[in-house]
Image: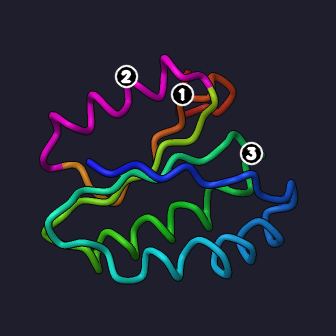
Amino acid sequence: MRTIRVGPLPERALEAAAQFHARVLPELIRPRADEDLVLIFEPAPYDHRGWRLAAVQDLARAAAPARVNGVAGDREAAIAQALAYLAHAPGVTGQLLAVDGKSPESR
């Protein structure tokens, strides 16, 4: 499973999405069909979830049958646990897992 750390990105969601789409996405547009991918995002305010999830879902559709997921957080132990889970969950794709301890999804 290939991991790509995304960031740092601007604090404002619109600016962060624009920078992601301009700098990071072009490298991922042609996903490797033989390798699962996990994007690791730094923690961000709640309004970043929408664009991040949409990007992960679109990449997952393009990469099928390979899987694409996202993990949001900065605690290395929590990121490692999420990566271990994803490595053994072959049906999980197109998801954004919050492991930052701040988001409602990670509590």
The label nearer to you, 1 versus 3, is 3
Q: Residue at x 17, y 39 (%)?
A: 89
Disc on the earlier residue, 3 or 2 = 3
In the rendered image, residue 64, in percent from the top left (x then y), is placed at 18, 72
Q: Is residue 82 above or below residue 44?
A: above
Amino acid beneath label 2? Gln
Residue to which mark 3 is pinned: 44
Inter-mark Cα distance, 1 to 2: 12 Å
Residue to which mark 1 is pinned: 106
Q: Residue at x 28, y 28 (%)?
A: 84
Q: Residue at x 69, y 53 (%)?
A: 7
In the rendered image, residue 17, in percent from the top left (x then y), is placed at 71, 71
Q: Is residue 61 above or below residue 89?
A: below
Going by the image, does 3 lie left or right of 43?
left
Amino acid beneath label 1? Ser
Q: Main secondary structure of the magenta part?
A: helix
Inter-mark Cα distance, 3 to 2: 20 Å
Disc on the earlier residue, 1 or 3 = 3
Looking at the image, which is closer to me, 82 or 53? Answer: 82
